[in-house]
Each structure stands twice: as C-alpha cells, then as structure tokens.
Amino acid sequence: MKSSKKIGLLIIGLTYLLSFGLQASLYFLFIQSNPIWLSILLVDVIATFFVYLVGTIFQNATVYDPYWSVEPMFLSLFLVILNKNFSLGSLLTLAIIWIWGLRLTINWIITFKNLTHQDWRYDELKKKSGKLYFAVNFLGIHLTPTLIVYLAMLPFIYLITNNLAFNPLALIGAFVSIFGIYLEIHSDIAMHHFQKIRQSKGEIINVGLWKHSRHPNYLGEILFWWGLFFIAVALAPSLYWTGVGAIANNLMFVFISVPMAENHMATYKNDFATYKKQTRMLLPI
C-alpha cells in the first residue's frame, strides 16, 4: 500500500480534508471567543499535531510536506468567508495566495513518489537525533514551519479582519508576490527538464535562473511572503510589525534551508565548491 503513489496521495489528501474539518469544528465549538490571531494559531497548531500523528502512523514525515502550501489556502479562504470581507484588497490577496498555493501543491504532487520515500532532510535528522527523533520530528519538522508560515500569514489575517479600504500602492506588493511565484515556476520547470536530460546525479544545474542563483526557488518563496506584507502595509501602515513573519521566513531559508541543502549537495555534486564560488546564493546581483 505504501509503495503506491495513488494510495499515498489519497491518504494524504484525506488527512488534510480531515484537518480542515477539525480546524473549522474546533473554531466554532471552542475557540472563536478568543482574539482572531490566537484562534487561528490554536487551530493551526492542533491541525499540525493531527498531521504529525498521521505521519507517525505511516512512519513518514513527508505527510507534512504539503502543509506549507495547503494550510494558507484553507486559512485564507476560511477568514474571508468568516469575516464576509469581499473587498478588492481582500480578494486580490486571496487570489495571490491561492495561485501560489496551487502551484506549490501541484509541484509537490509531481515530485511525490510514495509513502516509502521520505525527504532526505528528515532521514538525516532521524539519524542524528536517534531516540529523540519523535521530538525533533514534531518540534523541528512540523511545528517550526507551521509557526513561521503562521507569522507570515499575519499581514493577511489583520488585513481581512480589519476590512481595509483598497490602496493602489498595494499593487506594488502584489507585483512582488507574483514575481516571486514566477521565479518559483520558472525554477521548477528548469529543474524538471534538467533532471530528465542530465547524464548523472552529480551534474549541477547551471542554466537559466540557476546559472545566476543557487536557489532561485527559495528566492521566489521569500519574495512571495514579502509581497503579502507589502500589500498589508500599503493598506494600513500600522501593520508594519507583521513583517516579523517575512523576516522569520527569510532567516529560516538563509540559516537553515540553504545550509542543509548545500551541505547535502556538496557530498555528491561534481565540483560543487567551484559552482558555489561562481554563483550567488539567492540574489543574482
């Protein structure tokens, strides 16, 4: 069963549908009396724990992988409907989040193999942590990314709940987010094509955006969240403090995701040290 891609996708799909139902039910039954920022945080963490349990049952933390993209889509739509906020700024931001989320989720589906395959990063953490892997799994692989995405969603949460009037300056933020999505799409297409034509696993992709940036897909992800923040600040400058999410996301990529990826590539990529010297980490300037 675990070796089937279709069954794996079905199990993960049902997991997320149940998590959405769990979040909505808990919100209306127990949590809605709290401030909206706390209510969303609570249901988000509870859903993360539910996904963690399913992953533990199947002994594969990869069950959590699509959470990064599908949870913001669910929360954004839930908040718009809950607050009956169908203003231009609200719908524009909702559309951008869904375009980003669908793209990222589709890319994950394409690359997903089955429930016998787990991300190499999780395998490394499991090997290093030993008996403490259960804690590393929940706190590091599951909860930390959830909290970072929650913080990055704060601009949208406050944008929706305050029903802010549209400001043309918000289009600047929209452009930044859309440009980030474009970088991710372009990077993924180039990577998929490269993987089909490469002669060996040790080859380094050095074409297109990858020739100028070692992680153009990460750059796109960073720009996407900064764009959402710019939209919120354009509509309400007092929301400047919600930039903590974009900052946290930046720090995660620069100090965790990129070093882990590059340390791993250095073990099997041909002359990776030279490529690293010749190509910038993120910004191609």
Image (cartoon, grey):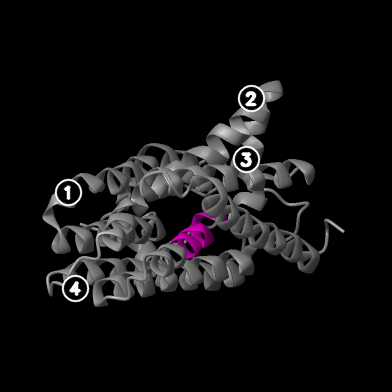
Q: Are marks 3 and 2 in contact (CB under 8 Å)?
A: no
| Residue 242 falls left or right of residue 7 | left
Quadrant location of the C terminus?
bottom left
Q: Residues within 10 Å of mark 3 (few under 14, many from 20)?
A: some
Q: Which label sits on residue 129?
A: 2
Q: Is residue 266 left or right of residue 157?
A: right
Q: Visible in this render: residue 51?
A: yes
Q: Is residue 276 above or below residue 111?
A: above
Q: Is residue 266 above or below residue 11?
A: above
Residue type pointed to by label 2: Ser
**Closest to the observer: 34 or 231?**
34
The reply to whether the C-beta atoms of the residues labelled 3 and 1 are less than 8 Å apart is no
* Disc 4: which residue: 171
**Left/right of residue 241 with respect to residue 112 in the rendered view:** left
* Number of other residues with Cα within 10 Å of mark 4, as a class: few under 14, some 14 to 19, many 20 or more: some
**Hey, what amino acid is under mark 1?**
Tyr
Q: Check disc 1 and report the residue beneath it.
A: 240
State the residue position of label 3: 122
- Kindly report the distance in space between the C-alpha atoms of the residues bearing marks 4 and 1: 17 Å
- Dominant SS of magenta comes to helix
Local SS, label 3: helix
Marks 3/2: CA distance? 10 Å
3 or 4: mark nearer the eye: 4
Task: Mark 1 vs mark 2: give the one in front.
Answer: 1
User: Tag 1 or tag 3, which sits nearer the N-term?
Assistant: 3
Tell me which numbered mark, 4 or 1, is placed earlier along the sequence. Answer: 4
What kind of element bears circle 2? helix
What's the magenta region? 66-75
